[in-house]
Image (spheres, rainbow, N blue to C red):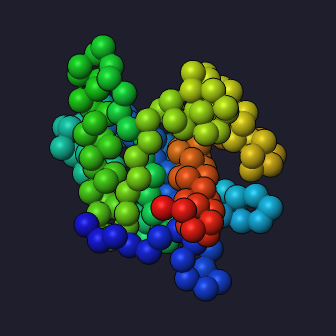
Amino acid sequence: MSEGTPIGAGPGSPARVLGVDPGLAVTGWAVIEAGTPRPRLVASGVLRTRAREERSVRLHAITEGIAARIATHAPREVAIEQQFVAENVRSAMAIGEARAAAMIAAAAAGLPVHTYAPTVVKESVAGYGGAPKEQVREMVVLELALAEAPSPLDVSDAIAIALTRLAEARFDARLRASGRP
């Protein structure tokens, strides 16, 4: 996979991140653009697959759907939520496969992929790693000054994942500017 261009690189080029909340039935996605004084939501939505279709067809649809969002919105990086260890093995496998489908689309576009544990995303956006999804959604609304809350929760989760990547990139840039390793 290509390293791609890091966030914030390039004169006059706004940083865009595609956040992905993977799921076999519903994959949330959001494109966030870094901005001053706050990031801006460029676009968001969900990719839905039908349970009656074969898994390979569903995974292909996720790959193609993410690839289409990359082509349309030109993010520089992709941020994807890591799979948590679930008690339901079947569910965990489906989420992992959906995650892989999104990663394949990013790799095909030559974009770097950053992954974040759900607790890291919640900590970054809501200040508490155990925050419920509804609290994360409310913090996303505040952070982006949205007129209404994104729906379904898969969308607000994808926004939160992208915001986490932007926060990490800002921190890394400050660290580099300070001369620290």
* Furthest residue in direction bottom, as rendered: 11
Residue placed at 23% from the left, 22% from the top? 90
- Residue 150 picture quarter: top right
Q: Is residue 47 visible?
A: no
Residue placed at 60% from the left, 33% from the top? 123
* Furthest residue in direction front, as rendered: 180
- The front one of 125 and 136 is 125
Residue 152 at what x, y percent from top left?
58, 34
Numbered label tally: 0
Residue 108 at what x, y percent from top left?
27, 67
- Residue 91 picture quarter: top left
Residue placed at 55% from the left, 82% from the top? 10
Q: Is residue 129 above or below residue 160?
A: above
Q: Is residue 102 left or right of residue 153?
A: left
Residue 22 at what x, y percent from top left?
39, 40
Q: Is residue 118 left or right of residue 55?
A: right
Query: Which quadrant is the N terminus positioned in?
Result: bottom left
Q: Is residue 88 visible?
A: yes
- Residue 23 picture quarter: top left
Residue placed at 44% from the left, 35% from the top? 117
Q: Is residue 138 left or right of residue 42?
A: right
- The front one of 5 and 20 is 5
Residue 135 at what x, y percent from top left?
68, 27
